[in-house]
Each structure stands twice: as structure tokens, then as C-alpha cells.
Image: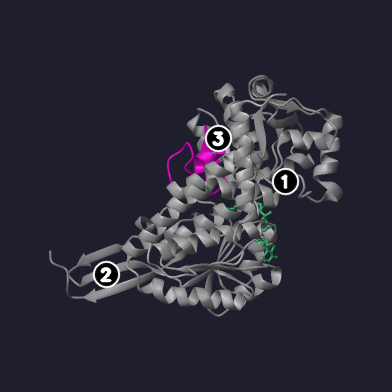
Amino acid sequence: MPLNEKAVQEIVQEVMAKMQIAQAPTDKHGIFRDMNDAIEAARKADEVVRRMSMDQREKIISCLRQKIHENAEILARMGVDETGMGNVGDKILKHHLVADKTPGTEDITTTAWSGDRGLTLVEMGPFGVIGAITPCTNPSETVLCNTIGMLAGGNTVVFNPHPAAVKTTIYAINLVNEASLEAGGPDNIACTVEKPTLETSAVMMQHPLIQLIAATGGPGVVTAVLKSGRRGIGAGAGNPPALVDETADIRKAAQDIVNGCTFDNNLPCIAEKEIVAVSSIVDELMHYLLTENDCYLASKEEQDKLTEVVLAGGRLNRKCVGRDARTLLGMIGVDAPSNIRCIVFEGPKEHPLITTELMMPILGIVRARDFDDAVEQAVWLEHGNRHSAHIHSKNVDNITKYAKAIDTAILVKNAPSYAAIGFGGEGFCTFTIASRTGEGLTSASTFTKRRRCVMSDSLCIR
Ligand code: NAD
């Protein structure tokens, strides 16, 4: 088949990106063999950062924002190449989002009281060297987003990334330190080790210099951090339900849910993982999912086969996480049409493909008798993670009732889940949503400690 100009361009771009990946640095700035050396280097950088003006921090951050834009495609390709998860187009968007919408020093604010007895300020001060643990699902996105916030707060950071995403993480950490050096800052404001393991993580968690640990990942890591005896910011797992009631614009709900669910092949922790719909509109919703949103209706037999592959031996099969719908269908011998984006079926809330946080474009639909039943089932499916939940409804009383019952850090109404992180919604971006420890969507101010500064009987000039 003859290739047109566009196809040739795409092949050239892909080959060039692969060459860039092959030549990606593995041992330049901020990369150490030993975790203790990484922490010591970050401490030295911290001595410089501590004395920096806010303006100087901001210069480094804006240089880093530019580098993220310039390297968005290579970072996206590296992430997909190394982890086998997600898709390049959406990962490019995620990096642009990090560059544009992660708050910098403007997030560091002061509270002041002045009166007869003088002036009191509460300032946001740095912790020093922060320890950060990052997931393989958003590897460079989390490293870059964390670093912008932590540096804006006046800290340096040592990462213990997921071993499946080391190359991508190292590339991102190099960018951070190059940005710092170019903007007149020190090297090693972000550091990591060549081979992160649970042992290097334990060294980090127990190191006397590390006063704050930010953990982004599943339940295991958050529990480990909370047991460490250090202050921990725990951004844990989710299983966000999307509730649809009879007042919703059903056609739009179907479109929004599929767009959110399929974004980066369902890797984001905030992405729709199942639907709970009131019985009267289930058939209409299914109609729009199938006729307008490129969904594939899995038969009972196909659901069973999918369960066997995706939850092999009752455990989440990592080879299926972050894969697209057609690849997943291919794994059970179904050759789906090229437009298929999402696999759907109706089932009870206990169905293993519904109750488990799969991180794949598979959407089970749970039928509810009425709105109250829908809320009850959605709350059950969220498993008390208190992470994210979504609703499609025009009834504010219903929305309020659901929001109170499910009690999550994020609740998106009438939009795809990614509106929560500033993509098609108001507000800033983050890839660390502290669901378990309650900070919610983290930003620079989350990575600071409150310090009260009191001037007695002076400086009130009213
Ligand atoms: P994961 O839990 O397997 O790994 C996350 C990180 O924790 C990795 O660096 C891993 O090496 C480390 N880790 C795991 N167990 C540990 C332990 N006992 N001690 C120390 N470190 C440990 O998760 P993943 O597959 O990389 O990412 C997906 C999970 O993360 C999902 O559950 C998703 O919901 C969650 N997640 C949450 C957020 C959030 O902001 N709340 C963001 C992204 C991902």
C-alpha cells in the first residue's frame, strides 16, 4: 500500500523519538547509586534553595515549564515505551497540563492579623528535603508536578520511583536539574537512585533528614508511609463510580463518561471506573454508549474470559493495566473494529470487573432501583477510598445528597473526570491527590509547614 505524506511524517517522527529515547541520559544530574548519597546531594542543594528569593524559585520553575513543553512528546513516548501503559497522545496532553497548570510560588501565601498588640503573620515555610514515592501510571507527570510544587515551597526532593518507570523518571529529573542550572540555581534540586527498590524506599523513609514523605500510589505504599513515623501525605488508590440519574442529559453523560474513562487508557486514579445508573435510563445510556461512543458490548462469555485474563488468579494482571480496549479484546480472541475505545457490559456491583480498580477502559454498568439505591451502590463501590466520584444529574438535591454520602476528595458533575485536574474545568492541576490523609489536591502550599511570626506592640500602623 503506498504511503501518503502524513503517514511518512508520522513514521519519521516515531523513529526520531525512538532514537531520542535510546540516547536518553541515565546518569547525569541528580542520579545516584546510593539513596544516602541522593539525600545528601539534595540536602546540599537545599542549603542554596533555602536562601533563594521567591523570584529566583519562580525563574527555575518557569524554565522547567518550558522544558516540559519542549519534551512533552519524548516524555510521553518514553512513558508508554517503558511501562507499556497508556497512550502517547493523552500523555502529551498531561505533560502540557503539568507545565501550564501546576501552581508555583503564587500558592505560597501569608495570613496576617494586625491590631492593638502588634502584627502576627503565619508563613508557609519549607520542610527541607522531601521524600517522594511515585507510581508507574503517571511517572514523569508526577515527578514534574511534585517538583514544581515542592520547589515553589522552598524544598528539594528525593524520589523513589516505581522500578517499572526508572528511565522515564531519570529523564524527567535531568530536565528539572538542567532547568535549575540554566536559571542560576543549584544542581540536584531533585534526585533519585539508579535502581529504586523497597530497600531504597525504606532508607529514604527512615533517614533523619526526611521530615515529610509524599506517597502517590496504591494502598500498600500509603500504609507503609503512614507507618514510617514521619509526616506522610498519602495519595492512594481510587475506584471512582460515575452515577447517572434520570434528570441527566443522558446523551452527553455517555460521551463525557467514555471520554474520561478512556483518557490515557483509564490510567488516571480519578478516571471513571464503573457506572451506576438508575434503572429507568440504563437502556438509553447503553444505546448512546454503543451507537455514538465507540463502545463494545461484551457478552457474558466474553466478560468471563476478560475476568480470567485481567484478574488472573484473582490478582490484577499488570500486562493488562493501561492497555487500550482493542488490545484487551485481542487478548480474549476478539478482533474488534478499529474504532472501539471502551468495553461495556451490565452487571452487579460485586462483578470482579466492576468492584476492582482495573485501570483499563472497561466500564461495567450497575443498575439501581432509584437514586437512593444508586448512591448506596456507588458508595460501596468507592470502597471508602474517599478519592473521586462523578455524577451526571441536573437535580441539585441529588447532587448534594451524593456528595455528602460519598465524601470524596473530588466530585465532578456533568463532565469527564479530567475536569477535576483543570482539563476542561476550572482549577489547578496535580497528579498527587491526597485522598487518604485529607489534603486533597496537592499544590505548593501542601508541601510547606506553618510558621507563626509575632511582632508584639509594633508595626500596627492603623
Ligand atoms: P503501586 O502502589 O504499585 O506503586 C506506587 C509506588 O509505591 C511505586 O513507587 C512502588 O515502588 C511503591 N511501593 C509499593 N508498595 C510499597 C511499599 N510497601 N513500600 C514502599 N513503596 C512501595 O502503584 P502503581 O501501579 O504504580 O500506580 C497505580 C496505583 O496508584 C493505583 O491504585 C492508583 O489509584 C494510585 N494512584 C493514586 C494517585 C493519587 O493521586 N491518589 C495518583 C496516581 C496513582
Q: Residue type at mark 2: give it.
A: Thr
Q: Residue type at mark 3: give it.
A: Pro
Circle nearer the viewer, 1 or 2: 1
Which residues, given as a range, are shown in magenta?
Answer: 403-428
Point 82% across, 38% down: residue: 331
Residue 436 pos. (x, y %): 59, 57
Q: Is 324 placed left or right of 417 in the picture?
A: right
Res 291 → quadrant: top right
- Asked whether mark 1 lies closer than 8 Å to ligand 1, one says yes
- What mark, if any, has residue 120 been given in the picture? 2
Q: Is 31 placed left or right of 340 in the picture?
A: left
* Crowd tier of the residue under label 1, counting other residues whose Cα lies within 10 Å: few below 14, some 14–19, many 20 or above: many
Using the image as rendered, state which of residue 173 and residue 289 is in the foreground. 173
Disc 1 to disc 3, C-alpha distance: 20 Å
Q: Residue type at mark 1: give it.
A: Val
Disc 3 to disc 2, C-alpha distance: 43 Å
Point 66% across, 27% down: residue: 3
Q: How many marks?
A: 3
Q: Is residue 415 magenta?
A: yes
